[in-house]
Image (cartoon, rainbow, N blue to C red):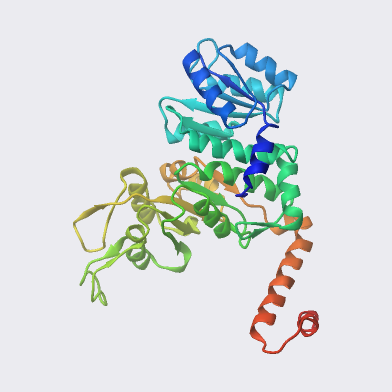
Amino acid sequence: MSVLLERPFVELSRKNLPICILDDDTDHVELTSRRLEAAGFPVSGTTSTQEALQQVRSGSCRVVVADLKMPGMDGPAFLEKALQSDPGIYVILVTGFYAVDSAIEAVKHGAYDYLCKPIDYTRLLKTLDDLTDSFTRGLQIRDLEDKLLDNPLFHGIVGRSPAMLEVFDLAKKIARHYTNALITGPTGSGKELVAHALHQMSPVSQERFAVSNCSALVDALLESQLFGHGRGSFTGATETRPGLFEYANGGTVFLDEIGETSLQMQAKLLRVIQNREIQRVGSPEVRKVDVRLIAATNRDLRAEVLAGRFREDLFYRLSSIELRVPGLAERPGDIPILVQHFVKKIWRDVWETVPGLDSAGAHRAVAA
């Protein structure tokens, strides 16, 4: 959830977020410490992992910005020990060799963020300001819950149950990294809304977001929709048309119900992920595309792989990040706020579309 803070409030909040800089390079520790102190954060720096862990245990820091490669104890090992000492600690890992797969693994194991050296201080400050907002309201889950008490919307998704708060929290973390994702959950649970939220919070939020329902089209039509076709490539193809992957180049393509696709279509989707290229139907030309692929399914794809109905290599490529959206039966506590949300929506729609309707009339219309 993106929260815009007034500058005086930001400066006040930063004073409440003590940070420890951990790196075996003393120059990096001093430079980062100076920059963050100038921004208003209480900062301590160290080259010792044991000293940093002691700060975590004592509660004297709430955030550790730690180098990924350190003698004696590397970043992932430090992350594990820090979280064992204080599950509420925020660890931001920093590396000189950024890789999306490593970033995703770090997030999966509890890292709040994963940055590349030399540090982009604008991004680091944005991350820390997100944390100041969380820390001043308590632990992460309770913070999200408090924010949603008056406004239960998270990028258009209604919910404040613990299960949904976990989905929102993970979505916030992984959206920063331009990588593929798999969203699972029962029909009607809001998988497309989660996909759209991932896009809105991503670095390519200003680019296009294209949607395709894989279960609604036979293979030939789905291939044409996704990859495009050349003129005369099939009956009715009177003109050349680009597909969704070209349309959303630089942005995101969302494939709903990917579990319904054939093995042949899955092979073509795998090529897009692996080689970043597509071919229009009826054209020999290979075109390069750069898209983030988000897929959704209500099926158990692991079972589908074992049954031979879904390619294991495609599942592996998609499931490096997996978000499970719980169905409403698993979060009955969200039912009252969903009812309230839709009542307010109906009220607003009636108010705006019925000429001369006053508030009492709108209330009666909704009640009826």
Percent coordinates x, y for residue 241 in the rendering: 28, 68
Q: Quadrant of residue 172?
A: top right
Q: Is residue 314 above or below residue 257?
A: above
Residue 85: x, y in percent? 71, 21
Position above or below: 107 against 76: below
Q: Position of residue 334 (x, y in %)?
A: 75, 58
In this picture, residue 313 sits left or right of residue 15: left
What residue sits 69% from the left and 48% below the top? 165
- In this rendering, the answer to whether 185 lies above or below 55 is below
Q: Position of residue 66 (x, y in %)?
A: 55, 22
Q: Is residue 225 above or below residue 197?
A: below
Q: Nearer the viewer, residue 78 or 350?
A: 350
- Could you tell whether 226 is left or right of 295 in the image? left
Quarter residue 39 falls in: top right
| Residue 24 or residue 11, whichever sits in front | 11
The residue lying at 40 percent from left, 54 percent from top is: 251
Q: Residue furthest bottom?
A: 356
> Quadrant of the image for the C terminus?
bottom right
